[in-house]
Image (cartoon, rainbow, N blue to C red):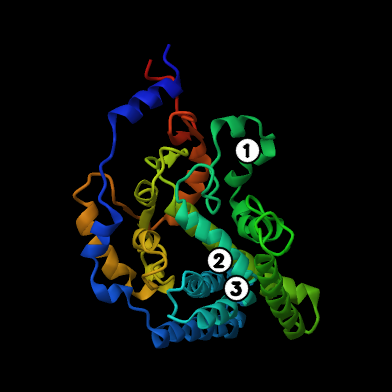
Amino acid sequence: MVSTTTLLKQDTKKVQQKLPTIDEIKAAIPAQCFEKSLPKSLFFLVLDYVILFGCYKALPYFEAYGWTGYFIWCWVTGMFAASLFCIGHDCGHTTFSEYEWVNDLCGHIAHAPIMAPYWPWQKSHRQHHQYTSHLTRDKGHPWVTEEEYVDKPWFFKHFAKFPISGLLRWNPIYTFVGLPDGSHFWPGSELFTSTADRVKCAVSAVAVFFCMGVAFHLSNYSVNTWFWYYYMPCLWQGLWLVVITYMQHSHPEIEVFEEGSWNYMKGQVQTIDRTYGFGVDTLLHHITDGHVAHHMFFTRIPHYHLMEATEAIKGVLDKYPGAYKHETNYHVWFKYLWYNVRFEYLIGKGTGVLRYKQSGEDTKKAI
């Protein structure tokens, strides 16, 4: 009988994917895609705040339909809060403007009110981009190997399969508790390695707590009001981020690389563009359907140029079978739930390249 690891080693040797260089791809992208416009970025920042203001003005109309209306309102408001997060995301990647101080100021303006500590997130998120699909260094999308999975208690093995878990995986699990790379609120966490980082963490955390306090004041100091009309929409914003991030990096053909097998281009082509449809991609500033372009040039291309850059990148990657991955997922929420059930852990540790073991799959079928 041939083991799964042996089969994966044989498969890895057979398939050595040829890829273009990052310079080849950059040369195919129109020069204007790399231009940053501060007025345009500020327009989108203000627009998202105006829309969120409208969401709160519309709240009574939703609540007229009871709890169903309220949770629909949370879903909608969470989506637009995720849109606001994407503007802060541009700031963190320095694609908001050419000015660092403007990026940092507007990044805090976008992130602090939705309970996202800007500078700590910027630090952890950059590592995700620098080491996309690296088994141990890609902290923004932590990978679980077979060896790690079998040692987990039942609850932790199956936590992600519960639909409600998505509400908690960004805030508080990732940002507050700090799984897997350290708390984004505590200056002493493992995420920070210098005094400057710790000071930045403290500043960003204070900004978040200040906004939480303002929300509490606007709630007439009612914990109940604060929870249902501030914290719950923030949880739904986190759920949108979890869904978006998970679906950008989950697919039956995804490969994850160990040290020595990974390189920048191999990692970036494991990213998937997904079209959600119904105008959602535009409302989310194309973080969904322009994510391959964003990943390849995460410090260079603002969100409003992503689709033009995507078309150019597709023109290059289409010459390399399987290099560009795209799906249209109008049912993305159901697919997210299904993927969490289906993709349990990675197999092939020690081969250099790991792939998902899918729930119900017989890994010994090819013997």
At 63% from the left and 75% from the top, the residue drawn is 112
Q: Amino acid at mark 1?
A: Lys
Q: Residue at x 71, y 57 (%)?
A: 189
Contact? badges 1 and 2 (CB < 8 Å): no
Query: Label 2 belongs to which residue?
Result: 122
Label 1 or label 2, whichever lies nearer to me, is 2
Q: CA distance from mark 1 to mark 2?
A: 29 Å
248 on left or right of 101 = left
In the picture, measured across the screen, residue 307 lies left or right of residue 134, that is left
Q: Position of residue 87 (x, y in %)?
A: 48, 75
Q: Is residue 298 visible?
A: yes
Q: Position of residue 230 (x, y in %)?
A: 67, 74
Tell me the distance, in whole angstroms, between the alpha carbons under discs 3 and 1: 37 Å
Instruction: Write down the quadrant of residue 9 in the picture.
Output: top left
Q: Residue furthest top?
A: 1
Q: Between residue 68 and residue 101, name the one nearer to us.
A: 101
Q: Residue at x 35, y 30 (%)?
A: 12
Q: Position of residue 302 (x, y in %)?
A: 38, 73
Query: For this view, does 12 lie left or right of residue 214?
Result: left
| Vertical comparison of 137 with 303: above or below | above
How far separated are the C-alphas under marks 3 and 2? Answer: 39 Å
Tell me which amino acid carries mark 3.
Answer: Tyr
User: Which label number is shown at residue 157?
Assistant: 1
Element under disc 1: helix
